[in-house]
């Protein structure tokens, strides 16, 4: 009964966030470290251990920790492995739960990062009480968690719900990690927004834009947002086309599982109505009449890192006592 705490870890393409969580979902301690600086998974786990160790000691030692839940790109719930994640340095199949459990000396469980966020939203956020919804994470990449009949959809192999890698524009933009042409992630992620902005700037050389004051290396999605709220025409059109592509994709997803809501989560949602309005317009425009005006399109109610930490930590309560 003394193991009443869980560690939740969310491994993102750029940063990893973590927290120590109690059974009520209160995050007692949180922290972060860079994901991208370690070329080897073993080095990353060493750094992660050193970062979390002081919090474990403050919480009363490792004997208070029931286990560790992790959300990660291409995380396989069944096998505890990260497999061929395009946005991470570590290639191939990584036996993550095995390595984490060995280092921390507690059991661990793993799921896809977007699935972890969906669980967090279902337990503590906008999806409370919902049995059918889709979580779309718009960050460095595009992830998704699909909940149907109150259960996360894992598929037969643990990899269901990779909606970010569905093809939305056949023969379209080359994806930097997968080599796919025209996938949703290549357009509707923060990375995709920057690529679209660069394409517009190159194609419309004679058109003035605040984005021209920023070097190509420094141009990021926040800069596009800052320009758009100042009514910069090119920046506003970047959001318009991003929302159009995302809305078309969401229409397909709605017709697949008929969710009560689609919940948008992640850094790109900070653009607010700049992204929400065109997305909603083009989702509705591409739906069959039986699906129109039925599906709520809303932003997550949880702090970005909190949802991922809470969702990952929820895996711990399902672990068998060892």
Image (cartoon, rainbow, N blue to C red):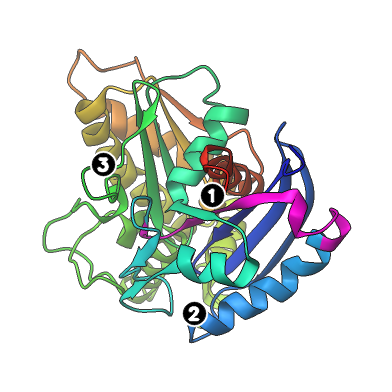
Q: Which mark is residue 205?
A: none
Left or right placement of residue 269 versus residue 285 in this view: right
Residue at (73% x, 37% y) in the render: 1
| Mark 3, residue position | 249
Query: Residue 124: which quarter of the image?
Result: top right
Left or right placement of residue 175 versus residue 35 in this view: left
Q: Residues within 10 Å of mark 2 (few under 14, many from 20)?
A: some
Residue 261 higher or lower than 17, as above or below:
above
Is residue 58 within the magenta segment? yes
Mark 3: which secondary structure? helix
Residue 29 higher or lower than 218, as above or below:
above
Q: Residues within 10 Å of mark 1 (few under 14, many from 20)?
A: many
Q: Nearer the viewer, mark 2 or mark 1?
A: 2
Mark 1: which secondary structure? loop
| Mark 2, residue position | 41
Q: Which mark is residue 266?
A: 1
Q: Residues within 10 Å of mark 3 (few under 14, many from 20)?
A: many
Residue range in magenta is 57-75
Give coordinates of residue 115: x percent, y percent.
43, 44
Whole-angstrom CA distance, mark 2 to mark 3, is 34 Å
Residue 306: in sight, yes or no?
yes
Q: Nearer the viewer, mark 2 or mark 3?
A: 2
């Amino acid at each position: 009964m003394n193991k009443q705490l869980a560690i939740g870890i969310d491994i993102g393409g750029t940063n990893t966030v973590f927290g120590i969580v109690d059974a009520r979902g209160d995050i007692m301690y949180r922290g972060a470290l860079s994901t991208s600086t370690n070329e080897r998974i073993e080095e990353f786990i060493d750094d992660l251990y050193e970062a979390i160790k002081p919090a474990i000691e403050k919480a009363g030692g490792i004997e208070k920790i029931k286990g560790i839940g992790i959300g990660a790109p291409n995380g396989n719930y069944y096998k505890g492995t990260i497999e061929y994640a395009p946005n991470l340095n570590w290639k191939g199949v990584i036996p993550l739960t095995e390595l984490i459990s060995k280092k921390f000396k507690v059991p661990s469980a793993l799921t896809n990062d977007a699935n972890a966020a969906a669980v967090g939203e279902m337990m503590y956020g906008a999806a409370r009480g919902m049995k059918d919804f889709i979580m779309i994470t718009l960050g460095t990449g595009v992830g998704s968690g699909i909940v149907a009949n109150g259960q996360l959809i894992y598929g037969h192999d643990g990899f269901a719900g990779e909606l970010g890698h569905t093809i939305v524009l056949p023969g379209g933009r080359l994806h930097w990690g997968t080599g796919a042409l025209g996938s949703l992630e290549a357009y509707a992620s923060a990375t995709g927004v920057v690529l679209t902005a660069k394409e517009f700037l190159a194609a419309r050389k004679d058109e003035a834009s605040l984005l021209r004051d920023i070097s190509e290396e420094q141009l990021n999605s926040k800069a596009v947002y800052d320009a758009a709220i100042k009514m910069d025409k090119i920046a506003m059109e970047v959001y318009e086309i991003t929302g159009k592509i995302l809305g078309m994709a969401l229409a397909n997803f709605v017709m697949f599982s008929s969710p009560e809501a689609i919940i948008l989560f992640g850094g790109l949602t900070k653009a607010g109505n700049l992204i929400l309005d065109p997305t909603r317009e083009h989702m509705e425009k591409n739906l069959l009449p039986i699906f129109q005006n039925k599906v709520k399109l809303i932003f997550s109610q949880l702090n970005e890192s909190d949802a991922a930490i809470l969702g990952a930590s929820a895996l711990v309560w399902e672990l068998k006592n060892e």
